[in-house]
Image: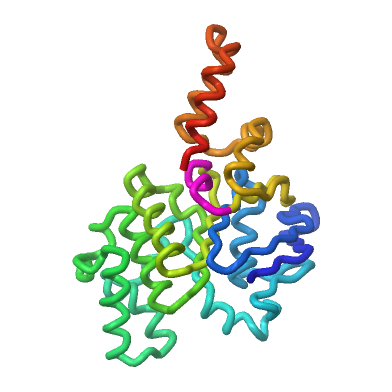
Amino acid sequence: MIEIKDLYFRYNKTDIALRGISLDIHDHEWVSIIGHNGSGKSTLAKLLDGLIAPSKGEILYDGVKLSPETVDNIRQRVGIVFQNPDNQFVGYNVKYDIAFGLENHQIPRDEMIKLIDLWSGKVDMKDYLSREPESLSGGQKQRVAIAGILALNCDIIILDEATSMLDPQGTEEITKLIIELKEKYNKTIITITHDLGLAMKSDRVVLLREGKILLDAKPSDAFKERDLLLSSNLDMPFSLKALYLAQSSEKLKDNKELHDLLWEYHLKK
């Protein structure tokens, strides 16, 4: 379990990113942290991976507090995939990119080759091992980043806006992979996103606004909070955009049956 207790973070005296966040994330759970730009989502992701330290409060992994003394051990369990796949590609081809983390962990060469072969196959990138990054799609680059994390045996994967720069096909590829990682490999998944379509597929939805938690619920319950979600400037799926347009139309704004049908359609995973 990940325990987040009364977490604060400020970049300076006036810019407070998180204001007393408390949250538990259980093993093998997929939690989506949603919110508009500036809500504190990416700050929380960096805190969870120990890239920055909280101004106040604490984060515990199975009862062990994340601190300068424990961060290296905890990072062996936690892998993070960032928004721009080009910024995280460090090898000159797929094979060497997956190998990068393994080399840093001084994994023996024979074992390294087996791990690269195993996890490149698991993310459907085995046929691309000799390909250079510029020849890959955004979704394929994200798959390579995830393969590198899995090769290190991370059991917690944080995806910080990892689909925001992808086309619909790339987003669908990553979504399917997330579901497989959770259901088949028992990974704990944390997606940081403003995409309600992606969040709908997770186990829990946590809505942040101005550094505070406004909502923590199952998607089926969270998505009943129409006004709260619509006021949070999130990326709406097609069905919710259609609902918003219908509510704004003079001809359709009073058609409650249509509004309810569009909303119920979206609630189907």
Reply yes or no: does residue 46 show up in magenta. no
Q: Residue at x 58, y 13 (%)?
A: 253
Of 248 and 105, the residue lying toward us: 248
Q: Position of residue 12 (x, y in %)?
A: 75, 59
Q: Residue at x 27, y 58 (%)?
A: 134
Q: Is residue 10 left or right of residue 144?
A: right
Q: Position of residue 4 (x, y in %)?
A: 71, 66
Residue extending farthest top: 251
Q: Quadrant of residue 89?
A: bottom left
Q: Is residue 143 left or right of residue 24?
A: left
Q: Position of residue 100 (x, y in %)?
A: 37, 78
Of 131 and 1, the residue lying toward us: 1
Q: Which residues are magenta?
A: 196-203
Q: Position of residue 198 (x, y in %)?
A: 48, 47
Q: Is residue 211 left or right of residue 48?
A: right
Q: Is residue 85 above or below residue 170?
A: below
Q: Residue at x 38, y 54 (%)?
A: 174
Q: Residue at x 28, y 83 (%)?
A: 114
Task: Name the image quarter holding the N terminus.
Answer: bottom right
Reply yes or no: does residue 202 show up in magenta. yes
Q: Quadrant of residue 19?
A: bottom right
Colour logic: rainbow
Q: Is residue 75 left or right of residue 207?
A: left
Count of numbered circles on the image: 0
Of 188 and 53, the residue lying toward us: 188
